[in-house]
Image (cartoon, grey):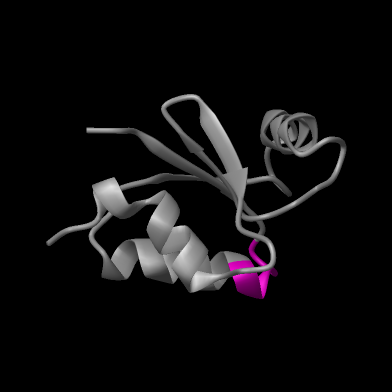
Amino acid sequence: MAKVKVYFTSWCSDCRKALRFLDQNGIAYEGIDVDESEEGEELVLRVNDGRRKVPTFEIDGRYFSCSPYDRETLARELKDLQKS
């Protein structure tokens, strides 16, 4: 199964919605709070062309941001990981 990492901040409402979506769909993930992880913040900046966009997702080396949060886009990006 694909490994999912989510780079987020605790104060971000889009992040809370995205994490709730993962939980509701039974998708296991590792969460990295970029306010607490310098490496996480540097990665988010690097993969988003210098922008601190959260939530940013990493799935098996592929990165994408879901900011602003869009449930349909996130569902499409994670379709192979969702429980039936």
**Residue at the extreme top of the image, as rendered:** 61
- Against 78, residue 24 (above or below) is below
Q: Is residue 40 left or right of residue 78?
A: right
Main SS type for the magenta part? Answer: loop
Where's residue 74, x and y in %?
47, 60
Q: Is residue 45 magenta?
A: no
- Against 36, residue 67 (above or below) is below
Q: Residue at 62% across / 70% down in the picture? A: 14
Res 84 → quadrant: bottom left
Where's residue 54, x and y in %?
68, 55
Q: Is residue 18 left or right of residue 24?
A: right
Q: Which range is magenta?
A: 10-14
- Against 42, residue 73 (above or below) is below
Q: Is residue 19 left or right of residue 13?
A: left
Q: Residue at 46% across / 69% down in the picture? A: 72
Q: How many marks?
A: 0
